[in-house]
Every structure is written in structure tokens, then in C-alpha cells.
Image (spheres, grey):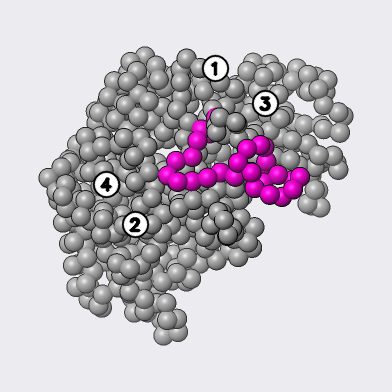
Amino acid sequence: MRDTLYNIMVEAADRVAVLDQDKTYRYRDVLDDAARLYERLNAAEKGTPTGTHILMSAERSYTSVVMYVFSVVYGYTLVPVTAEIDNRSLARLINELPVAFFFTDTLTDSGSSRLLTVAQQAACPTLVAERGKALSDGAFHQPLPPLDANSEWLATPSQDNPDLYLIFTSGSTGNPKGVSVETHNLLNYLEATRDEFGIHADDILSHISPLSFDFSIHEIFIALFNQAAIAVLRENDKFNFSGYLNRHAVSVWASVPSTVAYLNKTRQLNPNQYPALRLAFVGGEPVQPSLLHTLTQAAPNCTVHSYYGPTECTVAMMACLYNPAKEYAQHMPLGRPFGGHRLLIQTEADGAFHATGTGEAYIAGPQVLKAYWKNPEQTALRFSYHPKHGYMFRTGDIIRIEEDGNHVFIARQDDDIKIGGYRFNTAACRTFVEEQTNAEDVVVTPFSHSNEGTFDRLLVVTVNAEISEAALARIFRDQYDNYVQPHFVNVSELPMNRNGKLDKKALMEKVACHV
């Protein structure tokens, strides 16, 4: 994978690689800047940095693309972290990984940052990029390793290093968990997307996702692998998304559904607005067909796919082509697997794996990872090896496999909860509330007023519902038994995390006064 990507980029030396604001960079520029950084680090005052992992807290930019290429070409494992990571978690990464250095380009006006301070206090080498300058011109500081450093500190990067990047799940289904993606996992994904969707060198791919979200891996590496161009969305362009898409003539776009909903809400999805857009992927959470319909009207030349795949299976492994002439249910089907993957159903009846039916979904195939980073309990729960199917990942999703091979998402397994000792399905409740209120979105989540670890109440949050909370409560009482006594709250919008997914902690803080 490392040699493959390097050779592809060398072959495309004079092609455009990155469009960042008003500047254009060619593949030659990217490789040269990565090489200069390597030389700079080798000439560091205290010798070549040891360690195989690069921790990175950075914004989308040409500089961060160079860092991705640098890590691949020179044998490092990149670890992108969100700017919101807490001090303790960052210190743990520094202490438990063989870190070469911590890289950041997000500083305050005083020239520092909270995360940079944590790294420096932990005696971690640091590289700070200077705005508007080459990555090799950044300020590099390497303290001497502590005397009690373990042997991992002495590790050095190698082309044989199988771990390409270590990324953390969004935490939308629990606490964030780290997974190491190996070179062969990503190579399969890149080859599969090229063959399945026909991405080519004349394409210009959007780069709009935070670097800590695995959609950014899709955006950057699919472009590089196909000798295409990456169009960077800077933070200050987020409120003029339409201008960004048209200025760079973006032809391939990937995003979470909330991004499409935001564009629709801010009137940036007008008919025929994006003629250059030819291919779009929308995924990361259930996708409403109405959003894809609006997108196809704004981009009449665009083929749109809903996209499915957990981080534990290297970005995605299933897609469904949206057909504007077809009637869909409330959410888009997941479609069919690609890239040599299989989705198998395990039923409660016999515990065996089946190619049809309804039950909890397990994924098998070449992109399935093997374990969570330093989390043996969750690894044992989610990852397994089957003598027939190979490595498998237990998704926690309840899925129905149709006779025609199509896959339909039903609910999360953890959507089944107990309230007052009675089993209750939050997904079915959400569907019922959406139908009754015509709300833009609905969140149903249990909570408790006690510290006993059991749920005794239900919170139902609607977004711009067309009926009042009191009217919804009356309808709800007619549908459900008295043991379910929800609190209904209507809001104008839901809080989202940096990955564009629901921030449940922020939501509970927002509606705390109502419960």
C-alpha cells in the first residue's frame, strides 16, 4: 500500500493534487514537501525522532494532506485526534503509544494551545505548523526521552509497518473506541470504490469532514489513489458551502445526512445549482430519501448513494443507489455489499449465521479489523474469527436481508430498552412520533432520575414539530401503555459533534430544564 500510493503519486507528478483556497498544488509539490519534512526531522538537533505514531490535531488544509502523505510514504502510523479530546485521553495516547511527535496547526493568537501544552508537559516531541508556510518550516521541538522510557520508545518507522492509521469511533453508540487500520484494509477499500463507482483522475473530490472522522480518509485517499484532486473546505467557508462547491467544480462529494439537511435549510440546494457534481455518498447514520431527492434536484447530473459501514470495517462496505422514481420507506435501504464483503444475520432461534432473514448483522470481509486498541472487553464482545467466514465484526444493528439481496436497517440492538421492567423499542417509538408530528428529526432516549442504573423515564425530542408537546402527549397515551411516561421537548435544532452526528451529552444539557 505504501509503495503503491507513492508510485501512483510519482506518476501523477504534474497533475493537480490539492485545491486549497486560492492556491493550487500538484502531486510533485505534495511529495517534495513530505520529503523536505523528512529531511528536516532527520537533521533535528537531538537526532532522528524515534517512535512510529504521529498524533495530529489539525484543520483541513494542504498542510494536513501533506502530513497524511508523509505518514504513508515514510512508514508512520497517523493518529488524528479531535480538538475536543480531553487532557487525560491525550496524555494516555502519548504515554501508551510509541509516539514520534505531536503535530498541530491550531494555535491561539498567543501561539499556543491546550493540546500542545499537554504534549509538551508529557515530554513529547512536537511539530507546530506555521500558517502559510511549508510543513518543513514548522517549529520542531524534541526533548530527550525519559530515562524510564519503555522499549517502544525506541521503535522506528518502516515501510513494513502494517498500521496505516489509528482512528477513534465517533462515540454515537457508546464511548469512542480506537481501531488500527492496516495497509491491506485500506487498499481493498480504495480498489473496491474505484471499481464500484468509477472514480477517475479527472474528478475533484470534496474534503469537508473533520480529520478525526473516517470520512476524511475516504476523501483524501480515494483522490490520491486515483490521481484526482482534493478540494479543501476551510472552516471559514462552511457558511458558503455552495460557493466552495462551484468555485472548485467539485465532482465527487461525501457527507453525513446532517450536512445535506443544513444545506437544504439554508437554501443552498436550489434546482440545478451544482452541474459539476456527478457522484455523491451520504452516510454515517440513517438517510432520509427526501434529502437525497432534494440533492438530486440541485445536482441533476449526480448519481447519489446512501453509504453504510462502521469504522471497524474501514470506512464503508455497502451502498444503495438512490432512484428518484422509486418509492422508499422512511429511511434509505443499506443496499448491497461491495469489495468482497458479506453481511450475515445471526438469529436468536438457532444462533447460526444466515444469508437471509432478520437479526443482528455481522460483517465479514477484507476490510474488517481485528481488535480495539487496548480494549480487550469490547474486542471480545465485537470481534471474532469464524473458520468459514474469517474475521467478523458484530455491528449491533438489526438488519433484514431481502430475497433480492438488498439490506434494510431495522434498529440498533440497543434500541430495545427496559422501562419499569417492561421492554420498549425506541426505534419504533421514533417512527411513530415522526409520523404524528411531521418533525424534521426525532430523538428518543431513556434516562433515570435515580442512581440505580435502571431507566424509569423516556425523553422524546422533536425538531420543529407541527403539533404541540401537549397534543403529542395525548396521542402518545392512546398508543402506549401508562408505564411509558415520556417528557416531550420540541427544539429548533439538535446539537451535533464535529463529525456531524448527534451529540447526546450536549442534547441532555440543552433540555435539562425540561426533565
Q: Tell me which residue sits at (64%, 16%) in the image.
A: 466
SS for dot 4:
helix
Question: Hey, which quadrant is residue 142 in on the image?
Answer: bottom left
Q: Is residue 152 magenta?
A: no
Which residue is label 2 attached to? 104
Q: Please, what is the three-letter code of the amino acid marked with disc 4?
A: Leu
Magenta stretch bounds = 333-360
CA distance separating discs 2 and 3: 43 Å
CA distance separating discs 4 and 3: 41 Å
- The earlier-in-sequence mark between 1 and 4 is 4
Name the disc covering residue 327, or none. Answer: 1
SS for dot 2:
strand
Please state which of residues 361 and 419 is positioned toward the viewer in this rendering.
Answer: 361
Q: Please, what is the three-letter code of the amino acid marked with disc 1?
A: Glu
Which residue is label 3 attached to? 431
- The earlier-in-sequence mark between 1 and 3 is 1
- The earlier-in-sequence mark between 4 and 2 is 2
**Marks 1 and 2 close (CB-CB < 8 Å):** no
Q: Is residue 165 above or below residue 352?
A: below
Q: Tell me which residue sits at (81%, 31%) in the image.
A: 485
Q: Quadrant of the C terminus?
A: top right
Name the disc covering residue 224, or none. Answer: 4
